[in-house]
Every structure is written in C-alpha cells, then in structure tokens.
Image: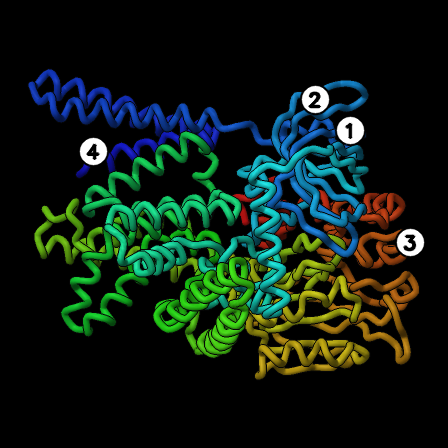
C-alpha cells in the first residue's frame, strides 16, 4: 500500500491517542511504535533497506501525530472553571461571523486578549461567549471591553443529542458573560470585518426578497444555518441532504464548473488562475470558517490534483497539515465528513462507476456512483452522530441535489448582478421557487415507508469491521491478493457479524429502564420495558429551542426507537408540552394521552405528522398496556374547571413489582388527595422541586427509594428548594437532579435498582 496512506493512518492513530489522554490509548500507541521500530531494524539487518525506511517513515508519522495531539490547547472550560462565578473585566476581539441579534439583546464570541478579576490577570487566551442586553445600530466589530459575571457554558447533557461541550472544546470557548456591560473600542475595521458585514448584507437582502427560502439559500451559499427553520432542517436531514445546508464541497465543485464554462474562451492557464481566484474570494466572503476552508481545499484537490494516486496523496498530506495546525479537528464532525466524502470520491468512485455502468445507462451510473461513493465512507459517522441512516438519501440526492445546486448558482448569479448592476433579484426569486419545490418533494420522499433506518448506538469496533467489509466488497487494491473464494467467505463472515450486532442491539433482552432527560427547566421522561414498549411522559419546552426535535427525538433514536407506543402529556404548560410538535415530526406516535383542557392545536400538531395516532382523553383509573407485563396507569385526573399546575394528570408505570410515579406539577392539595398508592420505587418530584412540594405526609405514604428532580441549571426560580430537598433526604430517598447530573438512567434488574448520570457514567448509556 502507498506509504503516504499508511503514514496518514499512523498519524491519525497517534493524534487520536494523544487527544484521549487515557492510558489504554497511550499503551496502544506505544505498542505500535515499538512494532514499527523493531520491524524497521529487522528489515535493515536483513538488507531490505527500502522496507526498513518505510517503517521509519511510519514511525515518524506516528510520533508526529502524538506530538500534534499533545500540542492541542487545554480544554478552555477546564481552564476557566476555577473562576466561574467571579466578576471579570474582559478585553478581546469580536469574531464578526459570530454576532447575532436577538429580541433580548446581542450575542457574540470574542477571542481573549486580557481578562481580569479583582485586579488579577487570569492566564487565559482562548474565547468567551458574550451576551448583552445592549442593542447596536450597527453590527459590533473590532475590539471590545466587557464586564460581568463569568459563568459556565450551559448545555444539555443527553445521549444522542448535539454535544455542545465537544463543539465548545473544538472552538476553544471556555465560558460566558451574561448581561455584560459592553463598550466597543473605536478603531478602523479590517478586511475580515468588511467581508463579514458584506456577508450579513447579502443574507438580509436574500431574506427580504425571498422570505424563509431566502434564509435557506443564504445558509447554502454563504454558510451558517442559524436562521433555518426546524422543518427545513428536518427535511434535509431525513433525506440525507444535511451537508448542503452550508457551503459544501459539492457547491464549490459546481461553482468551479460554472466558472470554467464562463471563462471558457480564455487560455487554460489563465482560466485556471481566474477560477481559483474567484473560489478563494468566495471562501473569504463566507468567512473562511473551517468548514468553508475544508470545502475549498477538497474542491481544489479533486479538480486540480492530477491522477487518482496524486489526489489521494495530496488529500492525506492535507489532512496531516490541517491536523498539525488544529489537532482538535479530528473530533469535529465537519472535518471527518468532508474528508470522508472526498476520500470516497477519490478511491471508491472509479470502482463503483465501472460496476454500475455494466447494467445502468452511463448518465445514471455516474450520478448514482458519485452519491454512493461520497456516502459510503461516512456511514459509521452518520450512525455515531445521528443513530440512523436515511435510506431514501440515494434517491433524494439524485433527484433533488441537481435542483439545489442550480438554485445555488442562480443565487450567486443574482447576488453578483445585484451588486454590480442593481438587478438580478428575479434570479433569486426563481431559486427560491425551486427550493420551495424541493422541500415539497423532500417531504414526500421522507414520508415513504422505510425512508430511514433507525439503528441506535453501536460499539466503536463495528466501524473497523465496516471499513474492512467495504474494502473487501469493492475489491480495492490492498486486498486483491485474496482469491475469489476467500473473498466471498470473508464478505459473508463480515456481513453476518455486522447484521448480528445490529439485530442484537435491536432485540437483545434488557431490564425495565427509565430515563429522565435533561431538558432544562422542564420535564421529559422515557420508560422502556423489557419487551421494548416505550412510553414518553412530557416533552419539555424552551423558548428558542425545540426540545422535541433536538433532545427527545435524538435520544429515542440513540436507543434504537423509531416510534413511541404511548405519549402522555401531564398538562398544558409549555415546559411540559413545548416539544410535542418537534417530537411528532421526527418519531412516530401510536397513542397520545392528554388532559381534557389541553389546547386543541397541540393535538392537531401531533396528528399532522402521525395521522394514525390515537388520541385519548382518559378517565381516572384507566390503564394502558406497555408490552407483556407493563402498565401505564392514570392515578388521578384533575377536577373539572381546575387550572394551572393542578390541571395535571398523575400517572404511574407498573412493571413486575416496580412502580414509578409521575405527578406532573401538582400542588400539595392534589398530593393530599392521592391515597393508597403504596410504595413507589421512583418518584419524579412534582414541579421541579419547588417549595412546599412533596410534603412529609405524602412521602410517608409512598416511601420513595429514588426521587428525581428535573430542573434547569442555574434557573431563576431557585428550583429545587432547600426545604424540599431536606424532606426528601429525611425520607431516605436518593435524590437525583438533572441540573447537576444531566440525563438520569435508572435500571431495574435482578441485582436491584441502579442509577446512572450522563455526566459521570456516560459509558452506561
């Protein structure tokens, strides 16, 4: 195999081992280094200097990777942690592309030049997120003075969801200053500030001319997806088109082809230089963010890298150089997806195209081959991050991507014509119309049965087996020493192994398990019975953040669930039902149990996505099956005419002698009405542990073993209240809080009840 390829693998192994900071990874890297050194020495002794030199080169790459990984900056959050809660004065440089204006003020990220607390200069030079209630007539740029209370970055700690801690780690953001007093430092704006301002002006122009479709086109053409609505984001993800929601390599390839055609009458050398210059200028306009630069680099490699072998060498060396510069990109989703797709187009495309051309027309074989070659290498990453595979993505990419790329070209042309000559908006409106049609078709495709396959969480070693299987199936050069019989046997063995692991993860027996999700100041719990039945009690709800689509649905996919047997909404407060629409848009719902006074539009939102869903207005004492032995019981219904927190359904889940009680937000008056409940193993504490909840009499009646409190970290209500915590402790209940522990997992098995925190026991989720 090519020494550059092997060297890159050694570099990646070394860099990854150093970034993990764990003894097993160091030991593995040490064993590999020793093996390479000994092998090189043996080859030299036996006179095979060429092989010996190759081993030394590989050892060099391994050591280079280790050094690069060790050079990664310290976790910014850990660096700032000792100073959280202190008043600080901050001086830094605003990142222009990070500025966002909100109804309540302005937010941005600034790179630290100096930060002080009590006249002490803190040893910190990474980034901080700033929130201020101040509004600015123009967008803030340049240097800024801030003062305020330094706080930890807030995040939701749940399986399957967006890992904001990892993202902040890669970006080097260590903390935040909320309600900061901000003073902009006067001074001249630089080139980056000018380009960022121009970027914002173009986005605003697109949105004004084409509405929400204009915002979508702005994300595709100029990068960033903060303004995209949740429905469009979902449709792109379900159709395997999420990579097009920002400046992607495919956009740049199409743009390059268009520019080469536009400059077709120029000499080839001039045409190439002019095209490359336009691409660089375009990347600068998009902010030169890492994803944009990676897309630019990948496009230039694919277009100008020469032969397949030369492109492969350049790709590998580019990855090494970029990781030496920024080793933390090795854990960045955008980096891995862009390099994985480029690798597929270099190494897999010729093989796949030649095989498909045997039974498909040439034009169709090329279209299918490009899509398949770009997606096959990133399948393990898609499963690891999204826990599902959009099976419809092949058809969606073939049918919809050309239209989207045409929309991108029309949008770029419109912006150029509008900037230079004052017209061209009609092209943007044509592009917006095309995007609207794409969204309609995407919704149709996403609704097809088996449009996506929810897989759940698989062991990491499955990725190694998958890549080996892929290499053998495509009969790449590195395995062509295998005879046909050996190759077929190996393919069969690897396929059976992968399918077996997938089936085991889906159907393996498991004990009764309850999850209490970290949805901030709200409630959401999931109960899974040994037979696989799934009940969701409430969905949380936050302003400006869809807990249903971003927390509850990704969590359910992470445990391999693509539908909910029963969804119970305790009452109509937004912090309990705000995520219903997002959940229904992503996960099927068989039955929804709602109180009588729940707003009808909430039910309509569910039925819009789950048309076969059965809507139930229950009676007190009714029970609903959860598999073989499980029951979801309506313990108490609100009295007619009740409102507020007392308009709650009180529910319980019973299974094989285990009982979990979900009282919603009921008051102590409703608690006093609950009689003959018996021992409750797990109590979800009512109303986030507010003052007066869980009275002594109530706790003496149910004797909870575990009490779970769902509350937002640092919430303004002071939940949970110290008096409530004191009563729970006096009742000998183990208190678990989502604001401290993240998502909580409780397992009921033959060895007793086990409790896990996602913050401290992530490996058990």
**Crowdedness of circle 3 by 10 Å Cα count: few (<14), some, many (20+)?**
some
Judged by depth in the image, the label closer to the viewer, 2 or 3, is 2
The residue tagged with tag 1: helix, strand or loop? strand
Q: Residue at x 32, y 50 (%)?
A: 342
- Labels 2 and 3: the sequence-earlier one: 2
Picture disc at residue 3: 4
Q: What element carries label 4?
A: helix
Tell me which numbered mark, 1 or 2, is placed earlier along the sequence.
1
Q: Which mark is residue 692?
A: 3
Q: Percent from the top left, x then y, of residue 668?
A: 90, 61
Query: Along the line of sight, which residue is nearer the eye, 116 or 721?
Result: 116
Q: Which of marks 1 and 4 is nearer the N terminus?
A: 4
Instruction: Measure how far apart labels 1 and 2 are at the Cα level.
Output: 9 Å
Q: Which of 429 and 165 is in front in this view?
A: 429
Q: Which of marks 1 and 3 is in front?
A: 1
Gap in angstroms between the C-alphas marked 1 and 3:
37 Å
Q: In this view, does 136 lie to the left or right of 414?
A: right
Residue 525 lies left or right of residue 461; in this view the side is right
Q: Marks 3 and 4: which is nearer the front?
A: 4
Q: Looking at the image, is 591 positioned above or below residue 485?
A: below
Q: Percent from the top left, x then y, of residue 292?
A: 46, 47
Earlier-in-chain disc, 3 versus 4: 4
Query: Gap between marks 2 and 3, in whole Å?
Result: 42 Å
The image shows residue 600, relative to residue 495, as above or below, that is below
For residue 144, which quarter of the picture? top right
Residue positioned 71% across, 72% down in the render: 633
Q: What residue is shown with label 2?
A: 122
- Measure the C-alpha gap from mark 2 to mark 4: 46 Å
């Amino acid at each position: 195999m090519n020494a550059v390829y092997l060297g890159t693998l050694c570099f990646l192994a070394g860099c990854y081992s150093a970034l993990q900071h764990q003894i097993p990874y160091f030991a593995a890297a040490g064993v590999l280094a020793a093996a390479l050194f000994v092998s090189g020495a043996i080859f030299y002794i036996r006179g095979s200097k060429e092989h010996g030199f190759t081993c030394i080169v590989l050892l060099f790459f391994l050591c280079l990777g280790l050094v690069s990984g060790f050079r990664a900056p310290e976790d910014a959050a850990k660096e700032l942690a000792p100073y959280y809660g202190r008043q600080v004065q901050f001086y830094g440089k605003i990142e222009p592309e990070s500025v966002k204006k909100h109804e309540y003020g302005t937010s941005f990220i600034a790179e630290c030049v100096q930060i002080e607390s009590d006249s002490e200069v803190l040893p910190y030079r990474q980034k901080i997120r700033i929130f201020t209630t101040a509004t600015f007539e123009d967008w803030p740029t340049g240097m800024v003075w801030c003062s305020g209370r330094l706080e930890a970055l807030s995040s939701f700690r749940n399986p399957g969801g967006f890992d904001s801690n990892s993202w902040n780690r890669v970006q080097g953001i260590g903390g935040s200053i909320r309600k900061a007093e901000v003073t902009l430092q006067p001074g001249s704006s630089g080139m980056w500030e000018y380009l960022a301002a121009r970027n914002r002006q173009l986005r605003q122009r697109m949105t004004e001319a084409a509405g929400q479709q204009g915002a979508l086109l702005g994300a595709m053409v100029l990068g960033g997806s903060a303004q995209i609505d949740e429905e469009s984001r979902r449709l792109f993800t379900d159709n395997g088109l999420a990579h097009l929601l920002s400046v992607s390599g495919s956009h740049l390839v199409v743009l390059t082809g268009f520019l080469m055609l536009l400059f077709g009458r120029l000499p080839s050398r001039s045409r190439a230089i002019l095209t490359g210059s336009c691409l660089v200028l375009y990347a600068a306009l998009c902010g030169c963010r890492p994803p944009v630069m990676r897309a630019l680099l990948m496009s230039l490699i694919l277009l100008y890298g020469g032969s397949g072998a030369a492109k492969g060498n350049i790709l590998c060396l580019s990855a090494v150089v970029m990781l030496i510069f920024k080793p933390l990109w090795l854990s960045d989703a955008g980096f891995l997806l862009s390099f994985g797709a480029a690798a597929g187009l270099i190494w897999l495309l010729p093989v796949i195209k030649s095989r498909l051309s045997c039974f498909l027309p040439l034009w169709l074989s090329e279209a299918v081959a490009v899509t398949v070659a770009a997606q096959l290498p990133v399948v393990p990453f898609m499963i690891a991050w999204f826990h599902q595979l959009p099976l419809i993505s092949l058809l969606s990419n073939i049918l919809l991507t050309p239209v989207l790329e045409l929309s991108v070209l029309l949008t770029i042309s419109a912006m150029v014509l509008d900037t230079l000559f004052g017209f061209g908006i009609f092209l943007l409106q044509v592009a917006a119309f095309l995007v609207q049609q794409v969204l309609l078709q995407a919704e149709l495709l996403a609704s097809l049965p088996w449009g996506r396959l929810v897989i759940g969480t698989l062991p990491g070693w499955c990725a190694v087996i998958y890549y080996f299987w892929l290499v053998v199936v495509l009969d790449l050069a590195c395995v062509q020493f295998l005879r046909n019989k050996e190759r077929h046997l190996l393919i069969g063995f690897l396929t059976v192994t992968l399918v077996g692991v997938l089936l085991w993860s889906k159907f393996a027996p498991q004990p009764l398990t309850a999850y209490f999700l970290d949805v901030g100041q709200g409630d959401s719990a999931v109960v899974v019975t040994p037979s696989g039945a799934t009940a969701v009690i409430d969905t949380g709800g936050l302003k400006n953040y869809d807990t249903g689509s971003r927390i509850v649905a990704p969590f359910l996919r992470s445990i391999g669930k693509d539908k909910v047997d029963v969804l119970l909404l305790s009452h109509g407060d937004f912090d309990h039902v705000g995520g219903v629409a997002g959940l229904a848009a992503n996960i099927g719902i068989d039955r929804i149990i709602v109180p009588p006074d729940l707003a009808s539009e909430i039910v309509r939102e569910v039925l819009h996505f789950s048309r076969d869903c059965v809507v139930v207005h229950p009676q007190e004492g009714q029970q609903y099956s959860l598999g073989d032995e499980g029951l979801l019981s309506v313990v108490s219904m609100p009295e007619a005419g009740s409102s507020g927190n007392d308009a709650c359904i009180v529910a319980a889940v019973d299974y094989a002698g285990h009982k979990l009680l979900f009282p919603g937000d009921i008051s102590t008056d409703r608690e006093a009405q609950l009689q003959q409940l018996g021992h409750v193993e797990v109590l979800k504490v009512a109303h986030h542990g507010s003052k007066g909840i869980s009275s002594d009499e109530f706790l003496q009646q149910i004797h909870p073993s575990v009490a779970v409190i769902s509350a937002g970290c640092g919430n303004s209500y002071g939940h949970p209240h110290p008096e409530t915590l004191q009563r729970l402790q006096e009742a000998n209940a183990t208190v678990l809080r989502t604001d401290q522990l993240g998502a909580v997992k409780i397992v009921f098995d033959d060895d007793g009840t086990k409790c896990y925190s996602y913050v401290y026991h992530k490996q058990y989720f």
